[in-house]
Image: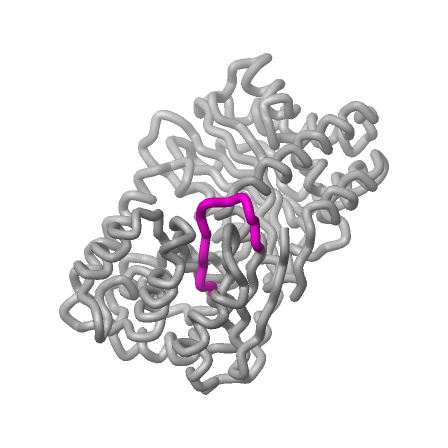
Amino acid sequence: MIYKKTVFDNGTKVITESISHAKSVSLGIWVNAGSRDEFDTERGIFHFIEHMIFKGTTNRSASQIAKDLDTIGGFSNAFTGKEQTCFYTRVLDKHLQFLTELFSDIFINSLFAEKDLELEKAVVLQEISMTEDTPDEYVNILSDQTFWQGDPLGRPILGTKETVSKITRKEILDYVSRFYSPMRVVIAAAGNVDHTLVVDYFRPFLEPLPERHNKSFKRPVPVFTPTVSFYPKELEQVHLCVGAQASPLSGEKRFAEAIFNTILGGNMSSRLFQEIREKRGLAYSVYSYINAYIDTGLLRIYLATDKKEINKVLELIEILIKEIKNGALSEDDIARAKDYLIGGILLGAEDMSNLMMRLAKNEFIFGRYIHYEETIKELEKVTLNEVIDVSERIFSPGNVSITALGPLDRDAIAVDPLKF
């Protein structure tokens, strides 16, 4: 693996990782801006821009863009996150030059035509409805709103039906002008790729772009709110999220937290899965995971269960967490969790898209390349006592928020999150 980085005069970065034995290239154009950078009245605009950017340029119609992408036989997509937006694709290495021209055209010359605006709004409104009809996904969105009350980090990435309906072309152009600026752009590529060629292919398109808004920006650090929030809905089950504040992406304790999360609910041998599903049959789906951001993080437990079992599963969650906090861990528990995480890291190293995304994220977070071996060494250094320490810190009194979606009223939840 060979890593290289070039910075254009206007601040755009090109980073590559060359894998000589690969037959494909995964390439992404990343923008360091996402839903937490939106104004409250314009929620969902970055996600809407992501949709509109494929709807035609000064050189290609939307149909021609689709045909060009299909012709090179690759996979292409885009996503909007809380902090970044990405347009990415994976193709055979022989198509790289054509791909860079196509993606540059889409990224720079999109029309955002009025005639396409209302049609795409209808598509996004359907996407919002689909999400609201998917309770295991929707409760996580509601959990964000509960946990980060009043902060942009808690807003849904898709926006709301009201805010999306009101988005104008003028607002889109304003956001593109302010946020899609060269200083915020990273081009990342991984696979059978020559760094010099990638730079040469992109330079004539991206380096001439002026840096109109070069002021640094600082997002306000969100404050979490420990509370119980219930959203009544006619469903067969209650969908539940239990959240607690965790470390940011660069936090010193992130490796210990990853091990703690794995032991708690990160896989099929985890304590939540074994106790709640395997031993008691109280839920089909139960797991935990960490959402980490540049300045904060959230460890979240999710499960779905019958409404009459809600307090039983909350009690079990509390017991399992307290056992870990009280030291009910062995060196074998730690070793198995490390092996699980390291296995995932090394398997991910064989996927070009995963490599590309890792390249970009490390650039945004750390400003440098981080080899897999460096991450593995940090994981291997974590001790049993460090895992216990992070469990105590994350699930400290007053650090828990509970969100429930389903056929249940607020009084049915007996657990006090302040004493969790």
Q: Residue at (48%, 77%) from the top-left corner? A: 182
Query: Toward which corner of the image does residue 311 lie, by quadrant?
Result: top right
Q: Which residues are magenta?
A: 18-30
Q: Is residue 61 above or below residue 417?
A: below
> How far across and down, in percent of the image, does residue 315 sit?
62, 26
388 relative to 125, above or below = above
Which of the 4 image quadrants contains residue 279?
A: top right
For the residue pair 255 and 410, the one nearer the viewer reads as 255
Residue 143 % position (x, y): 49, 46
Figure check: 104 above or below 181? above
Single out the residue that lies furthest toward the left: 115
Display colour scheme:
one colour
Q: Main secondary structure of the magenta part?
A: strand
Whether residue 52 can be seen here: yes
Q: Is residue 288 left or right of residue 106?
A: right
Tell me if 251 is positioned left or right of 74 in this view. Answer: right
Q: Is residue 110 left or right of residue 237?
A: left
Residue 218 placed where, x, y %? 59, 74
Q: Is residue 276 magenta?
A: no
Residue at image position (19%, 72%) is 113
Where is residue 127 shown, x and y percent of the image? 28, 49
Foreground: 335 or 58?
Answer: 58
Q: Nearer the viewer, residue 410 or 302?
A: 302
Q: Residue at x 27, y 69 (%)?
A: 167
Give the residue furthest to the top: 279
Decide whether residue 22 is among the magenta residues: yes
Q: Quadrant of the C terminus?
A: top right
Tally of numbered tags: 0
Answer whether residue 32 is visible to the viewer in this image.
Answer: no
Does residue 334 sit above or below 130 in this rendering? above
Which residue occupies 35% across, 51% down?
Answer: 76
